[in-house]
Amino acid sequence: MNNRESLKADIPATSVAAERPTNVLIVGVGGQGVIMVSKVLASLSQELGYQVKQSEVHGMAKRGGAVFSHVRFGSSVFSPTILEGDADILVALEWAEGLRWLPYLNQESGTFITDTQHIIPPFACRDRGRGAVSGYTRETVPEVMDSVTNSFALDAAEIATELGVPKASNTVLLGALSTALEFPVAAWKSVISKFVPSKTIEANTRAFDAGREWALSFDRETQLKDWTDRTKQDPEKTTDSSADVVSTLEITEAWCKGCDICVKFCPERCLAMDARQIAILTHPDRCTGCRICEWLCPDLAITVHTSKNNIST
Amino acid sequence: MMSDVAQNQFNIKEYIRQDLFPHFMCPGCGHGIALRALLNAVHDLDIDKNKLAVVSGIGCSGRVGAYIDANTFHTTHGRPLAFATGLKLARPDLEVIVITGDGDCLAIGGNHMIHACRRNLNLTCLMLNNEVYGMTGGQVSPTTSMDRFTTTTQYGNYEPVFDACKLAEGAGAGFIGREMTLQTPALRDLIKEAISHQGFSFVEVLSDCTEVFGRKNDLGESAEMVLAQKAGYRSDSYGTVVDEPFKPRGMQTGVLLRTERPEYAATYQQHNAEKLKQ
């Protein structure tokens, strides 16, 4: 192909004809479709006559855990796994997973394609009090784009949602990936249609086109500026004054019939039944004001008052 | 200095007759949860308490209405919808909400229910379905699940269950929804939509009878029964697609039907005006 399309970066598209196999690492969170992306890529390169080896970790979908898949293809491939610092392309379906696997990317010529979607795992939210900060990564898109030469950060989830198919964000990333490899577009689409439910072929084709279009019209400077602007707005969002919000629990003892629902449902275990079989707040400091007790109290005995402490503002 | 975060925070005490509390319902009864969801919906829609009329029938559900600090009518068994129809036609400016139970609405008041659906008058009917006649001692009701024990089905119930929402659909209700008390915020939002709908809105609330039905069937304590609404959600878990919506007792929840049919009161008044002119 003389007129080959490539990502508008300094480095030309990865050449698959080279003697060394092409290494593509696909990472994400269980349930996003990491395996689907890798299967499409593996099947496509196999159809085009390359030797393919793929290795994956799966079964995490139910847990929202980390999933990765190595795809290696070329004229001859021996090992199914990619060495650290040896991946030519790293496709991340989730922001933090992408950053976690960055060391696997070839630091000089590697291409990093990532979704900016944040999936915050429960263990990053160990402190559930008001205003608590989660343990999720704080790196911003401009910071990463500055440190990784060939990095493409797109909000695939947003693009897919705009198309009306929020689940197809992995196909959007496939579209972006397709510009980094010199495979014909028609072949991509025919393979994708084999791996998605028949009802969603049309939607996934649209998602693929959208992702491809995004990558073809990629302009580093505009993107960088755009993301810097977005990040600038964020501090206002993150300095949410929720830390100053105080929740107080009002229990009308005379109304409580001791059904135990609030005690058993409280996620912070801050309620208990006293000797009279009346609910009492034993750990006011743990209360996050989630209102589950208020909602489920059949006796209407619990009211959560949230108020703002004005002194600190 | 402390001040409320939300300017207009919902405080249930402004909407209930506090002198009647604690209410008569048993510990863990789901009707109290439904009452809160209803009052929160009324608060969110900013309905004036003087313009709110709550009509209720007989049974545990009938007593729920009496605790609301608004215009409330405690009517005869099975007839709240008939009373409400008259009330709404005479005073179309009122927001009329009917609270009824499974026995009240589907057994004794079954005929009134289907005709209210047929007319499509702008009413909101909240059917609190706890599968049993709780107040009278736990007799079998039209919605008692198969094989459940009640005082009148000592060897287990063998009558098929009534699907109230399908009945309402067949009779022509304009808006039909179903939600369980466990998902209180969702229930509140559903009631808000039902009240906003122009036409007859039927909402089935899956509630729990802990003391009578739960005890007889060994369904556990109050908290376990409430949680069981969700556990029943996925009885065939792993058998179906993961993304299939959760279904309590094998039933669909949320807004089940929304159709635009002519509202009865408007048609009635127009018809009367035309006839009087002649």
Image (cartoon, coloured by chain):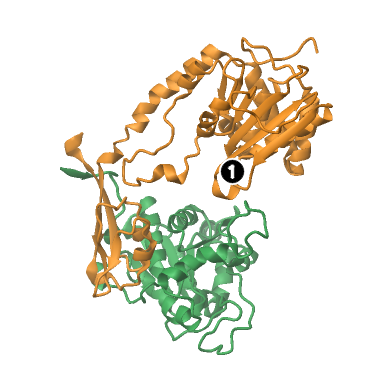
Chain colours: A orange, B green
Q: In what quadrant of the picture does the C terminus of chain A appear?
A: top left
Could you say where residue B132 lies in the image, as x and y percent from the top left? 50, 79
User: Residue B67 versus residue A119: which sits nearer the camera?
Assistant: A119
In the visual, does A232 lie left or right of A186?
left
Residue at image point 54% right, 73% down:
B112
Q: In what quadrant of the picture does the N terminus of chain A appear?
A: top right
Could you say where residue A4 lies in the image, as x and y percent from the top left? 75, 13
Whether residue A203 is visible: no
Q: Which amino acid type is marked by label 1?
A: Gly
Could you say where residue A278 lies in the image, as x and y percent from the top left? 26, 71
Whether residue B112 is visible: yes
Q: Chain of mark 1?
A: A
Residue at image point 75% right, 37% down:
A201
In terms of image quadrants, where is residue B13? bottom left
How many numbered callouts? 1
Residue at the limit of the structure toward the front, as seen here: A78
Density class for disc 1 (Cα within 10 Å; few <14, some 14-19, many ≥20) is: many
In terms of image quadrants, where is residue B11? bottom left
Residue at image point 29% right, 44% down:
B6
Q: Is residue A186 above or below residue A165?
A: above
- The secondary structure type at the circle numbered 1 is loop
Which residue does the numbered mark 1 point to in the structure image?
A30
In the visual, does B63 lie left or right of A303?
right
User: Residue A69 versus residue B71: which sits nearer the camera?
Assistant: A69
Residue at image point 52% right, 12% down:
A221
In the visual, does A8 lie left or right of A249?
right
User: Residue A185 versus residue B131: which sits nearer the camera?
Assistant: A185
Q: Is residue A254 above or below residue A225?
A: below
Could you say where residue B168 lies in the image, as x and y percent from the top left? 59, 66
In terms of image quadrants, where is residue A65? top right
User: Residue A98 versus residue B114: which sits nearer the camera?
Assistant: A98
